Amino acid sequence: SAVISQKPSRDICQRGTSLTIQCQVDSQVTMMFWYRQQPGQSLTLIATANQGSEATYESGFVIDKFPISRPNLTFSTLTVSNMSPEDSSIYLCSVGQGPEAFFGQGTRLTVV
Amino acid sequence: EDQVTQSPEALRLQEGESSSLNCSYTVSGLRGLFWYRQDPGKGPEFLFTLYSAGEEKEKERLKATLTKKESFLHITAPKPEDSATYLCAVFQGGSEKLVFGKGTKLTVNP
C-alpha cells in the first residue's frame, strides 16, 4: 500500500490567480496521476507524471493551464493556472492503477 | 469510445434494506473492472477487482458480480457506515488509464 499526503486540502482562490497542489508519497513510485473530479462528474485523468520526463496530458488538458512538476520519485505538484470559476473542482493525485491504485484525500478548490 | 455508466446516481436505503448498484461498461478488451468507495473529503479506496464474466467477490456486506456488459455491487443488510459514494472503473482499452463512472451516492438511514 501507499500513503499519499496532498496539500492543501481545500482553498478558495480569486479568479485569475494560480494554485499549486502538492502530493507526497511515502514510497518511491514511477508514475503519479492527477485527476479532476467536478461536481456530479466522474474522475477524469488530467495527466500522468513520470519522474525525469515531461508529463503526458489527456485530451482537453494542456500544460499551460495545468503545469506539473515531478522532481523526484516521491513528490509531484499540479498547478492550476489563471483560474476561472469553471476550475472549481476536487483535484486528486494517485499512484498505481486498478487494484493497486491509492489516492490522496483530494484538494477542494473553489474559484470566486 | 470507452464508457462507464453507473446507476442510480443516488440511493437512499433504510438500515437492513438490501439493494444493488449497477455499473454498465463498453470497452474493447476488458482487463479488469474495479469498484472503489469514496467518503466525503477523501480519495477513493479500492474495494474489488473483477476480471471475467461470472466472477464474484465478497467483502463483509458487499458482493460484486460481473457479466459481459455490466457489474453489480450488491449490498446486503446495509448499515449507516456503508454510506458513501461507490465508483466503478475500467482500464481504457489498450492503455493503463482508468475510466471512471460518475458514481452512486449511497445513504443508509438508521
Image (cartoon, rainbow, N blue to C red):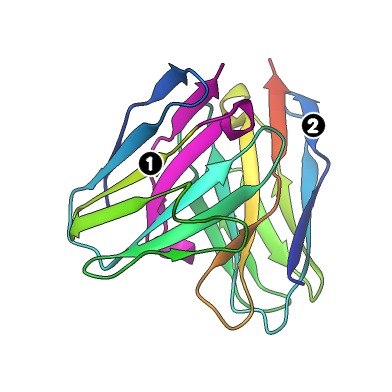
Q: Point out the image quarter for the N terminus of chain A.
A: bottom left
> Is A93 included in the stretch rendered in magenta?
yes
Percent x, y of residue B15: 71, 23
Q: What residue is shown at x 56% (from left), y 16% (from top)?
A: A112
Q: Nearer the viewer, mark 1 or mark 2?
A: 1
Q: Amino acid at mark 1?
A: Thr
Name the residue carrying label 2. Answer: B11
Whether residue B41 is visible, yes or no, is no
Q: Quadrant of residue A45?
A: bottom right
- Which label sits on residue B98? none
Percent x, y of residue B103: 69, 44
Nearest the viewer among B99 and A78 is A78
Same chain for mark 1 and mark 2? The answer is no
Residue A100 position (above or below residue B40): below
Name the residue carrying label 1. Answer: A79
Q: Amino acid at mark 2?
A: Leu
Q: Start and end of the magenta stretch?
A: A83-112
Q: What residue is shown at x 51% (from left), y 56% (from top)?
A: A62
Q: What residue is shown at x 68% (from left), y 84% (from top)?
A: B29
> In the picture provided, is A86 more to the left or to the right than B39?
right
- Marks 1 and 2: CB-CB under 8 Å? no
Q: What residue is shown at x 48% (from left), y 39% (from top)?
A: A91
Whether residue A7 is visible, yes or no, is yes
Residue B64 position (above or below residue B69): above
Residue B31 position (above or below residue A54): below
Residue B62 position (above or below residue B17): below
Percent x, y of residue A105: 40, 35
> In the picture provided, is B74 more to the left or to the right than A26?
right
Check the residue under mark 1 and report the chain it is in: A
Q: Quadrant of residue A86?
A: top right
Name the secondary structure under disc 1: strand
Q: How far apart in space, not on screen, are marks 1 and 2 (Cα)?
A: 35 Å
